[in-house]
Amino acid sequence: MTTVAPTTVEEIQNLLADAGQIIPFGAATKQTQPQQVVQVAGMAPTQLDLRNLSGILEYEPGEYTFTAQAGTSLATVAAALAEHDQYMPFDPPLVQAGATLGGTVATGVSGSGRYRFGGVRDFLIGVRFVDGQGRLVRGGGKVVKNAAGFDLPKLMVGSLGQFGILTEVSFKVFPRPATYSTLQATYSELAAVLTALAKVKGAQFDIHALDLAVTSLAERAPVYTLYVRLGGMENVLHQRIDQMRSVVGAGEVLTGAEEAALWQDVKEFAWRPADSTLVKIATTVGKLAELEAAVAPHSSQRRYAVGGDLLWLAWPGSLATLDELLCQQKSSGLVIQGETDRPLLGLRSGGAFAQRIKQALDPEGRLPNYL
């Protein structure tokens, strides 16, 4: 399979006119491949490396917005924002691994910071992309304002490159908290940690992240660890974390470099065993106990993020088995890391609508198809 690395949007448009199926990718930190690679018009598929479409085009610290090419690394953006004490609150994962803005949007992945502020779709305000017919399409804008018409930026979140090849994205950003503290509490029973989780969610606190990590090694009882992250001014943060500990009833307080390293490892999925497949599963805290009972016999490591509304699952076995399990649980999953030819697992919704969008933007099937 041929790999091409364009440097301009025009090159992408010309390629779509002359090539068969196009498979776009960035830094390949998230392993998603089309279910089937097909020849279009008798031509072999082409991999499209978008990393040369890189660089911040506009950044207005006073407006809390920036525009960058889709191949720009998250690390580049984070460094630029940090100079003005700003950041991307949805906490995008795999920054150190080299993840790009386009790949983050296309897979729709957000980190633990999504709990308070929302996910990538809540901060993406504008896009430019080349559709399957080679047309350059614009949606949204570069500033935060009300806009009429179809919300194309939201359409591209989680689209996996099926509707168009992202070339440019615009985001809004927030001021970065002065410091963080995390309360870490460990439990031996699921019922006890779920009770603590409910108390935390019901408390009147501005919580930046609320995760539940589960480790269930062979011949050992599962260990449930609750992480509650708070951010703000240092002179009041210690009081708030003490109040949170009174809500939970126990826990160790992590600060400084130790606290930052903990969440850095979470963002890089350092807890995932190398021989497992990382799967993002949409769920709800109300389904957590049932889902946990279903996956626990198969997986030694998993992390329920966003207050229990998202499961990061390290799956060691057959994805066909997981697909069936998720269907039984009426849940959907997306393979993020690991070898697979079927990134979408479990139940799928909105198929008819997606097919209509696909037909309008890519009628000849030049882009990947997961529908």
Image (cartoon, rainbow, N blue to C red):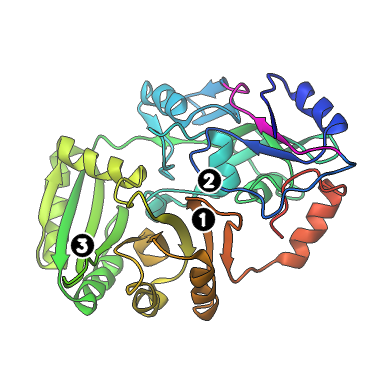
The magenta segment is 43-54
Q: Indicate which label's residue lies in the foreground, 1 or 3.
A: 1
Q: Which residue is mark 2?
A: 31
Q: Which residue is mark 3?
A: 225
Query: Is 5 in front, or is 196?
Result: 5
Please state the horizontal and vertical placement of residue 323, each as a whole percent of the image.
Answer: 54, 70
Measured in 3D between alpha carbons, the distance from the residue under mark 2 to the one under mark 1, in whole angstroms, is 7 Å
Please state the horizontal and vertical placement of residue 114, each as a whole percent of the image.
Answer: 42, 51
Above or below, comparing residue 136 to residue 294 in the picture: above
Q: Amino acid at mark 3?
A: Thr
**Quarter of the image holding residue 243?**
bottom left
Do labels 3 and 2 touch, CB within 8 Å? no
Find numbered disc 1 in the image and state the secondary structure of the residue it sits on.
strand
Above or below, comparing residue 123 to residue 349 in the picture: above
Measured in 3D between alpha carbons, the distance from the residue under mark 3 to the one under mark 2, in whole angstroms, is 28 Å
Q: Which residue is mark 1?
A: 335
Split into 4 quadrants, where in the image is the N terminus? top right
In the image, is 316 to the left or to the right of 13? Answer: left
Q: Amino acid at mark 1?
A: Val
In the image, is 324 to the left or to the right of 160? Answer: left
